[in-house]
Each structure stands twice: as C-alpha cells, then as structure tokens.
Image: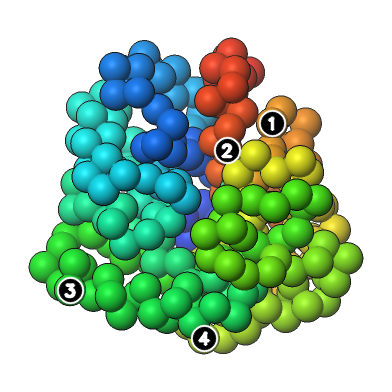
Amino acid sequence: MKTIYKHILQDATSGKKILAVLIDPDKIAIKHIPSFMGKVNKSVANYVFVGGSDVAEQQTEIVVQTIKKHTRLPIVLFPGDITQITNQADALLFLSLISGRNPDYLIGKHVEAVSKLKDSNLEIISTGYILIENGKQTAVQRVTETVPLQNNNIQLIADTAKAGELLGMKLIYLEAGSGALQPVSKEIIKKVKTNISIPLIVGGGIRNLKQLKQAYQAGADLVVIGTAFENDESFFDELQD
Ligand code: 1GP
C-alpha cells in the first residue's frame, strides 16, 4: 500500500509533528544497525530516511535490507544518486534540486532513473529540494556543483518553494546540508511555510531538542536528523516521548 504521502499530508494538516532519522549507508556499519534501530524504535521517530552523497553501489540495498529486519517504521529513500535506488525500501523522495541550475539534478538524473523505477513498487514522492547556504560547503553542494540560496534572500527561497509547489511537487525540503554549522533559520522556515500549502521538510545541522522544537514551531512539518544521532546516540533518549 502506497500510503506514506497520505500519512505525511494528514499529519501536516492536523499539525502533528513528524521526525525522520537519516541513515547514511556510507557511514553506518552493518553490524551496528540492530542496536541503532533498537534506539530508533524506542524514540518518537516516524520514518527512517536512507541516503547519502557518496555511497558505494549496492551498499544502500544491503543497509535497507538490514534496517527492515529491525524495524516496522517505513523506510524512505533520500538518494544522492540513482545508484541508491532499491526496491527494498517503501518510498522514494524523487528530489529535484530546484535551488540549483544544474540540469542533471533538475531533470537529467530523473530521466535516467525511469528504467529503474518502471517495475518498482516504491511510492514515488515528487519533492522540491532547496539547498540553503550555511557558512560552509556541504557534500550536496560539492556533488551537485550547485550554489545554495543565500540565507538572507528569504523572498527568493520562498518563491523557489512556491514554484516547486506550482510545478506539482508534493513536498518541499529545505536543506542546510548534512552536518551544517547552522540549521535553516526560523525566519526562512516561517516564510516558506506561509507561502506553500504542501508539507514542509527541514533538515541539516539540527543537533539538539531546542533546535528541533524551533524548527517545528517555525512551521516545519517533518524534521530530518542524521549527524546528531551518528555522533551521540544518547540524543535518542531525549526523544522518547
Ligand atoms: C541531510 O537534512 C539531512 O541531508 C540531515 O542533516 O546530518 O545535519 O542532521 P544532518
């Protein structure tokens, strides 16, 4: 049943806040997945996102298969490349990097992905992906060779998000980049949220409960956290209810 987007939409509409734990297949050891997922399962996390910027071929499939054995949470691919697409997951964020002007990441990779997706059962969720400057170069920026939107140009960020919605995208993802020094600001989240009527995802550089709450209060419907859990799993203890 392809109901992941329906649930995100329902939760976003009713004001319920959603949390996704991001697992980078390049950064987690397979043998560590059972204990890591034990902590995810006890936390308030609703989804497991899987993806990264530099991941060896086949690695995503092995990681997703192992995660599946240790959780009932839906697994959503958040791929940095088409080699990370695997039918073992439940859904795929079909990301178009609308903050950039690199045709490969706007449409090229998507055309390449079609042959892989034709016979797949993945729920495909069109997502407008917007990279925001955060003070240092991130992996997404390096790999995609795009320039992030400046964090003081809030109107441009809001217009970019709205253009994504008008193009028919189902989600907007504001991304400061994995391990960002600063998360996306409250002002940006607020402005984008008031300009769009589709669910808003925010991620990058969120490392503590205060920043998580700030993102939700500003208008994020779904927050993605990866690095903070990689660095300190005790963060899960703060997120038990
Ligand atoms: C990165 O938004 C995600 O794509 C999560 O970022 O690893 O900084 O939590 P962090």
Q: Nearer the viewer, mark 1 or mark 4?
A: 1
Residue type indicated by callout 2:
Ile
Across and down, in percent, residue 34 comes to 31, 18
Residue labelled with disc 3: 115
Residue type indicated by callout 4:
Leu
In what element is the residue under mark 1?
loop
With 134 as the anchor, is 206 left or right in this view? left
Of label 3 and label 2, which has the lower sequence position?
Answer: 3
Determine whether the beta carbon of the residue marked 1 sits less than 8 angstroms from the nearest atom of ligand 1.
yes
Across and down, in percent, residue 123 comes to 28, 61
Name which residue lies at 75% across and 49% down: 136
> Which mark is on residue 167?
4
With 206 as the anchor, is 237 left or right in this view? left
Badge 4 density bin: few <14, some 14–19, many ≥20, Cα 10 Å:
few
Q: Vertically, is 140 above or below 232?
A: below
Across and down, in percent, residue 47 comes to 42, 41
Q: Vertically, is 5 above or below 107?
A: above
Determine whether the beta carbon of the residue marked 2 sits less than 8 angstroms from the nearest atom of ligand 1.
yes
Q: Nearer the viewer, mark 3 or mark 1?
A: 3
Residue type indicated by callout 3:
Ser
Q: Vertically, is 190 above or below 105?
A: above
Image quadrant of ligand 1? top right
> Which mark is on residue 207?
1
Q: CA distance from mark 3 to mark 4?
A: 23 Å
Dot 4 and dot 2 residues touching (CB under 8 Å): no
